[in-house]
Amino acid sequence: MSEDKMLEGKVALVTGAGRGVGAEIAKMMASRGAKIIVNDLGGEADGEGTDQMPAMETVKAIRESGGEAEANFDSVGDFSAAKGMVEQALDHYGRIDILVNNAGILRDVIFHKMTEEDWDAVINVHLKGSFNTSRAAATYFRKQESGVFVHMTSTSGLIGNFGQANYAAAKLGIVGLSKSLALDMSRFNVRSNIISPFAWSRMIGTIPINDEAQRERVEKLRAMTPDKVAVMATALCADTARNVTGQVFAVRNNEIFLMSQHRPLRGMHEGKGWTPESIVDHAFPALETMFYPLDRSADIFSWDPV
Ligand code: NAD
């Protein structure tokens, strides 16, 4: 397949595309022929403030490389603004084919100190934001009987991490959203997949470093560039990836993983019906060999990135 034709004629909305992973996705999709709406509110890593520069810089880079892009500075957390992003794609380019839900913030704090605002801010940008843009795009995807969603999750949700209850809940929520979109919209030839990226960005810079092990982990993350994630996001949007939907991938530098999804691991049956006592006496000991330890992301991805 010709490199520059893969997304020719397609229009993509990439959220949070002013920096990090989103900026690389926007640029790579543009390099493969897609026209891009570059959304970025330009806030701080914790979601405070606004700045038009990040989105403008990505637009400038795309245009300088001969691509087409328009900036959007609104928040994905605002339902009507998200609708406006999709309408902007239609107004400028006449269609929308690809939605990448990438915008994100962090408010890391150990759970017993997490405020309602820490919770709401993270859920609003990640989970509600992904719903807002997806809902807006779904109307057009359904009408044209085609479309691709790509969302971002995290091993903080898929596996676990300290101090990220709000983020983990939001990111696992988006896994459910992606799967539901894949199911509900498959009849309209619409696909939805999710990527769990590992990439050095300012977001990683906010991971609290409390011990030597965490410091070493962050140093390794520094070597992983966000363009590696962009390669996967772009591939997922190719027409030739038509069989790829409802999946969870992880991308870590030059490594690509298909991640597992929740399925029954082991069953116990009690013909007379269970009591709390018999569960404690029989079911828990029988199931215990299959219990998951309290793993964190780094316990599972324990080897250096390749
Ligand atoms: P980043 O902070 O570099 O970029 C995120 C961008 O989103 C920023 O430019 C920010 O301005 C924008 N943004 C924030 N709130 C917004 C809003 N309400 N509306 C529009 N834009 C908004 O972060 P990144 O590392 O590039 O992360 C990108 C995505 O990948 C996020 O969803 C993140 O959770 C996920 N992720 C990243 C990593 C990683 O290793 N970098 C790991 C797991 C998951």
Image: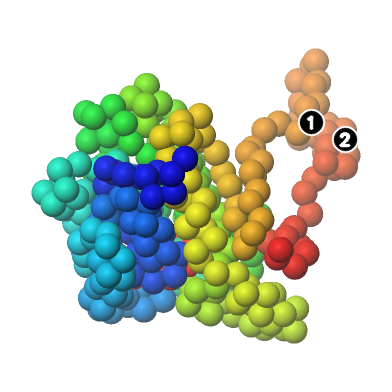
Q: Is residue 46 left or right of residue 88?
A: right
Mark sitting on residue 266:
1
Instruction: Determine crowd level at label 1: few under 14, some 14-19, many 20+ residues with C-alpha closer than 10 A.
Output: few
What residue appears at the point 56 percent right and 54 percent down from the top-left corner?
196
Q: Residue furthest left?
A: 91
Q: Is residue 11 left or right of residue 233?
A: left
**What secondary structure is marked by label 2?**
helix
Q: Amino acid at mark 2?
A: Ala
Q: Are marks 2 and 1 in contact (CB under 8 Å)?
A: yes
Q: Please name whichever residue, 112 or 54, is drawn nearer the observer in this view of the structure.
A: 54
Q: Please name whichever residue, 266 or 60, is drawn nearer the observer in this view of the structure.
A: 60
Mark sitting on residue 306:
none
Quadrant containing the C terminus in the rendered view = bottom right
Residue 267 vertical position relative to residue 64 in the rendered view, above or below: above
Can residue 131 be seen here? The reply is no
* Location of residue 152 in the rendering, given as x and y in whole percent from the top left corner: 47, 54
> Label 2, label 1: how many angstroms apart (C-alpha)?
9 Å
Residue tagged 2: 286
Can residue 45 be seen here? The reply is yes
What residue appears at the point 75 percent right and 84 percent down from the top-left corner?
212
Residue 94 vertical position relative to residue 100 in the rendered view, above or below: above
Instruction: Determine crowd level at label 2: few under 14, some 14-19, many 20+ residues with C-alpha closer than 10 A.
Output: some
* Location of residue 127 in the rendering, given as x and y in whole percent from the top left corner: 40, 53
* Location of residue 100 in the rendering, given as x and y in whole percent from the top left corner: 37, 51
What residue appears at the point 47 percent right and 57 percent down from the top-left corner?
230
What residue appears at the point 80 percent right and 26 percent down from the top-left corner?
268
If you read the primary sequence from the N terminus, does the residue marked by circle 2 or circle 1 appear first?
1
Q: Is residue 101 left or right of residue 229?
A: left
Image-quadrant location for residue 24: bottom left
